Image: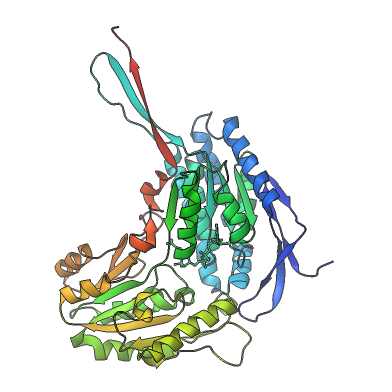
Amino acid sequence: MSTLDRYYNYIDGAWAGADNYLTIDDPATGEVYAEIAEADIHDADAAMTAARRCVDSGALNAGRPAQRVTWLLAIAEEIRALAEEAALVLCRENGKALSVARGEFEESARYFEYYAGMADKIEGNSIPLGDDYVDFTSYEPMGVSVQIVPWNFPPSICARSLAPALAAGNAVVIKSPEISPLAMTFLMTACERSGMPKGAVNLLCGKGSVIGAHLVKHVEANQIVFTGSVPTGQRILHDAAERATPSVMELGGKSAAIVHADANIEQVINSVKAGIFFNAGQVCSAMSRLLVHHSRVGEVIKRIRELAESLSIGPGIDDPDLTPLISHDQLEQVEAMCRRAITAGATCLTGGGRISGTNGYFMQPTLFTDVTIDSEIFQKEVFGPVLVIHPFDTEDDAVELANGTEFGLVAGVFDTRLERALRTAQRLRGGQIFINEWFAGGVETPFGGVGLSGFGREKGQEALYNYVQTRNIAIRVKGA
Ligand code: NAD
């Protein structure tokens, strides 16, 4: 019998074991300490059948929508009750700082509260067609929503899609990320305790190429909500095309902040700290490029270098500024990108490699300058604590540099001249633009990308409409 902490899948209202278990290690030490049942194709079919049965039973939609409000509020309450225990699990499996892990569960609870507030306000229109007709629209649930989650913020990204899907009356089958699936199981406990019907929510952990691909192509899938990397998103879009399954794609980014000549330097430094070192830079909307007006470059580089070299680094449980990367593979990939940047002629101001003397997956905070615009380090997502700093002369140059990648997730502008800041912001490519604070916004503000960063919006009122489809009913009430 295994001595590892053991976790299970959640299918049709019950916890399910498996023949095979995937092991989970602690990124701060490299030690394997837990395992989770690996779902196979039969488990995936069972989850999809349960979700379909739940949809067809009418249990989620037949009554008044106020019932869904009650369930969602109960889930939020249960998440808060479980949050401390769950945050410790997330901190250990993912490597992230304990305060960040706690914040994820608070944000998860907020998603359920926020969409609870909308669940009984999903109203259609009446369309005037003259005296002979009555015509109205209604928003119908999609049916079974398949949701595929990445490893960087597993509970909060899961809650971000699950809460609006349930608010709109869908049943959901979730695939957790195989390297950080444990803390997400607490969301299932919260759903279970809320009294929702069996089959409304199901959670499977398994390999993306096996059960992820199976779910995407499944005959019962009415929708795919994917958050993850560009190559996987492209693969899923191909697979979804077979059945013309509607999809939401939340993909990667290479987001730039523009620092104008009149920027407030303290705002810039605080935002760099959050923008690229929070969660060890493993954030889709990380500030991975900083474009600085040439008159401020010397000062900005000096301050950011001091910042990078003063960060506290350690295991998530100590709540330091910088935590380990998720895995050994991720560490190797980030290091390899830094090596290629140096070979291509970039200047590495600080960092550039792993932190030695530990079995944990710690990467040094890293700053690059003297990069060329077409270089890999300027164009591609690193997903680590690696920032590129590049000068510009004019606002037009800054906008061209910021918009000059295939991505378009977020962007930012720092300037005390708000008129110019707003004008620059309106010229930037991306679903969410920050002015004077990176990551400004919350569960209430729509989020999503253009270009290779994907399409569709999560968060905010708008996201609810990902999870419904419009039906129009036209009635001839008079005449022949
Ligand atoms: P990934 O694409 O490797 O994996 C994401 C999920 O897809 C995992 O659960 C994986 O098992 C599954 N998967 C893999 N192959 C599959 C297939 N063929 N069919 C179905 N599912 C499959 O991404 P990751 O490494 O977990 O996450 C990091 C990436 O996610 C980064 O690129 C980051 O920018 C992006 N991301 C985007 C957002 C956003 O909101 N835009 C948020 C977080 C992360």
- Quadrant in which residue 324 is drawn: bottom right
- The location of residue 301, given as percent across then percent down, is 31, 89
Quadrant location of the N terminus in the rendered image: bottom right
Residue reaching furthest to the top: 480
- Quadrant in which residue 186 is drawn: bottom right
Q: Is 310 drawn above or below residue 454 in the view shown?
A: below
- Looking at the image, residue 453 sits to the left or right of residue 315; the answer is left
- The location of residue 75, given as percent across then percent down, is 57, 48
Q: Nearer the viewer, residue 448 or 46?
A: 46
The answer to whether residue 229 of the structure is visible from this angle is no
- The location of residue 473, given as percent across then percent down, is 37, 24
Residue reaching furthest to the right: 1
- Looking at the image, residue 290 sits to the left or right of residue 263; the answer is right
- Quadrant in which residue 80 is drawn: bottom right
Quadrant location of the C terminus in the rendered image: top left
Q: Residue at point 30% right, 68% down?
A: 411
